[in-house]
Structure formats: structure tokens, C-alpha cells
Amino acid sequence: MTAHVTDDTAARAEFGVPTTELAVAADALAASVSPDFTYHHCVRSYLFAREIAAASGLRADIDYDDELVYVACLLHDLGATEFADTDQRFEVDGADAAAEFLTARGVDPARVKQVWDAIALHTSDGIAHRFGPVAAVAQQGIATDIMGAFRDRLTPEFAARVHAAWPRLDVGYALPAVIAAQVHANPAKSSPMNFASHLHRLYYPGEAPALTWFDLVEAAGWGDKPVGPDRPSRR
């Protein structure tokens, strides 16, 4: 899919978006392969991440690598595009594609790993923050743009300015629909209990298997029996 992103040059200057050679290349890649709702989400995720970090007392390029946070945010949904759609979880597809992009540009492997971790773990609430400041800062921005996770650390005025420059385009429903469609077309992209599987069940309720933990344990074939409190309904 080729994106048709509007010219946001003035807005990028207003918000001080990174302009390093690597940052510009990452932005160009994201813009070229993503629909507008995804691309806008990626830019907003960075701006929110940076603002949340500042509100938490973290200093760009002192407490975290700002360029890497930008690259991670811009590329974190490559796995939800045709550009990087394989048989893996979309988070891992995106992380691998970003790592390949960085490696081809001679980025130090230690920095590549930070971006890989940030992207692979961006849906992993409660885990990403244990993988260093780049993963932690990026995940907070991404989660805030979709789920409002750290919205209280943003001023309403700042959020409004960001949304005026990069409109939401109903991303909270549009992007999950893409992820669900990927799983529907290729079940290998998801295991029964992960995030993508949850989206698949929401968007394809009549076709996606509504598996529970009990179903998986019974299917294992080891003969385990319920213990403890009365067993809840399987559905």
C-alpha cells in the first residue's frame, strides 16, 4: 500500500521533530508503506513519548537516545503493512524489518537491538520498561496514542496541537482491523492468547475460534483436571 501523507513540513518544524539522516530515512520509509492513519499514529506516538518522558523528568539524549525513540516510534507498525507481513507476530515482523533497515545503514548492533526490543515489545505493557529507556519511552508514547495510558502527563493544549497536525483518522479502530485481517488471512501470525488473536476474535466473531485457557489445557492432552475455585464458564 502506498501512503498519501499530506505535507507536514511546517508542523514538523514547529514540534522539533528529529532531522538526522537516520530519522529522515525512517520517516520516509514509514510514510511510503503506511496508510495515513498508521503514519499519523507513528508520528504522534513519538511526540507523546517525548512529552511524557519530559513530564517524568527524563532528558532527551541524556536519559534516553532520542533518535532511537523516534526511529522506533516511526517504524513500530511496519509489521502491520504489506512491506513487512510474514508468518510472524506483527510486532516481530516490524522489529525485524526495522533492524534490517538500520543494519543496512551501518547502525551499531547495540543500537539496532534497542530499536528491535522497543518494537517487538510495544504491545507488552508491564514488560517493555524492563528493556531499557528506549523501549520504555517508546512504549509509553505508543500506548498513550492508542489507549490513553499516560494521557494525564500531556496537557490538553499539547495533545490538541498534535492532533491538529496529524489527525487521528479513527486509528483506534482502523489499525486493529488491519492486524485482525492479517491473522484472518494467515493464522500463523498469531497464537490463541496474544494481542493479535484478541483483535481477530473482535473483528471476526463468527469465524475466529473463541478459545479460552481451559480449552488450551484440555487440548494439550495431558489429562489435567480443574482444581481450586469452581471452574468458570468456558465462554
Image (cartoon, rainbow, N blue to C red):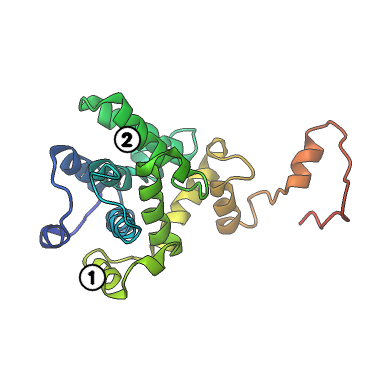
Q: Nearer the viewer, residue 118 or 28?
A: 118
Q: Residue at x 15, y 56 (%)?
A: 16
Of labels 1 and 2, the one closer to you:
1
Q: Residue at x 43, y 56 (%)?
A: 143
**Marks 1 and 2, how far apart at CA:** 28 Å
Label ID, residue 98:
2
Q: Nearer the viewer, residue 227 or 210?
A: 227
Q: Residue at x 44, y 33 (%)?
A: 86
Numbered disc 2: secondary structure: helix
Amino acid type, callout 1: Arg
Residue where numbered disc 1 is placed: 161
For the question of whether residue 209 can be seen, the reply is yes
Q: Is residue 161 above or below residue 78?
A: below
For the question of whether residue 85 can be seen, the reply is no
Label ID, residue 184:
none
Q: Nearer the viewer, residue 91 or 66?
A: 66
Q: Position of residue 118 (x, y in %)?
A: 39, 41
